Image: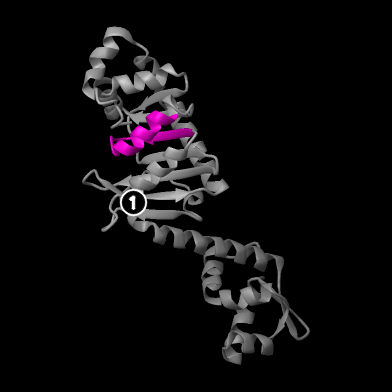
Amino acid sequence: MRGDGNSADVRQLLSQRADALSTLLEGDRTKSELTEELDVSRSTVDRAVRELESNGLVRREGGTVTATLSGRLAYDSYRRFCAETEHVVEFGDLLAELPPTATIGHEMLDGATAYRSEPPATGRPANEITALIAEGTRLRACATAVNDSAAAEQFYRMVTERGGEGAVVYASSLADHLREEYFRTHHEMAATGRFRAYEIDSLPYELFLIDTDEGVTAVVLVYNDAGTIHGAIFNDTDAAVEWAEERFESLVEAAIEFTNDFHLGGVEADQAGEADADGGTNAE
């Protein structure tokens, strides 16, 4: 491939001649063999080889055609582009609910599973998160709303009863609500020394990192315009977890810790805890 080649032209060529190039990546072929394997006319093969050769992606030696190093690298890049595009399309309805400035890496989409709030299982996304937390030993999360009482109860039990750890970055509006309405449960979690609370102005989505004995699962929870859960993307691949951990740490660095707000104790705890006297297990 010449150094002054047009990358847009090469991308277009790859989209048109990907079958021919991918076949050559398996090994050298004659034009007759390409014609038979691709099930196309000889003129089509001639044209494909000529175009690929003129862009340095293949070379002809005697009667055989060989993919070059440039051809292999170009095809690999094209294949990754196609895969990433497929992921965007697959999860497009969920991504469309997020702000245009939201940041989600392709790593979170590659190998992911999505659960949507669709009949008859509208509670599936929240139920899947709750099930993971129920088995969890550590939860790192970014929360924007009080969304599921069962998940919050399991988180509370993880920290106060099962010896687990938790760290949550709360959107400011939710942090204020927790101080006023759910002081006692957070006071009890903070008292274990295994819970940290952080506050940030706003969050584009909810993010969960849930450690269990089986490994770590990253989850992106998406709300719709009505403020209800639209769906969630689950991924336990190493790349997805690494992306989620980096994203979580960046949000922690941008946030302000307010764990000490739950260390007041005494009369303040009793008064603030009256609002969740049922045990305080219906909010995070």
User: Which residue is more in the foreground, 98 or 226?
Assistant: 226
Q: Given the image, on which type of amino acid does mark 1 rest?
A: Arg
Give the camera-side residue of 137 and 45.
137
Mark 1 element type:
helix
Q: Looking at this view, is 149 or 111 the one in front?
A: 149
Q: Residue at x 47, y 29 (%)?
A: 162
Total marks in image: 1
Q: Establish if 101 lies above or below 117.
A: above
Q: Determine if the magenta segment contains residue 145.
A: yes
Colouring rule applied to residues: one colour
Q: Which residues are magenta?
A: 138-158
The vertical placement of 159 against 40, above or below, is: above
Spot the residue most to the right: 62
| Residue 79 sits in quarter | bottom right
Task: Examine the rendered structure and indicate whether residue 228 appears above or below residue 248.
Answer: below
- Whether residue 42 can be seen here: yes
Residue 238 in the magenta stretch? The answer is no
Q: Residue furthest top?
A: 266
Few, some or many C-alpha atoms within 10 Å of disc 1 (few <14, some 14-19, many ≥20)?
A: some
Residue 135 x %, y % = 46, 39
Q: Quadrant of the C terminus?
A: top left
Image location of residue 246, percent across then percent down: 51, 37
Q: Where is 236 relative to 75, above or below?
A: above
Q: Quadrant of the N terminus?
A: bottom right
Residue at left offset 50%, top offset 55%:
110
Q: Which residue is mark 1?
A: 124
Kindly indicate the quadrant of the structure image that contains residue 220.
Answer: top left
Q: Residue at x 61, y 78 (%)?
A: 20
Kindly tell me whether residue 99 is visible in this rendering. Answer: no
- Taking the spot 44% from the left edge, 46% from the top edge, the residue there is 104
Of 116 and 88, which appears nearest the observer? 116
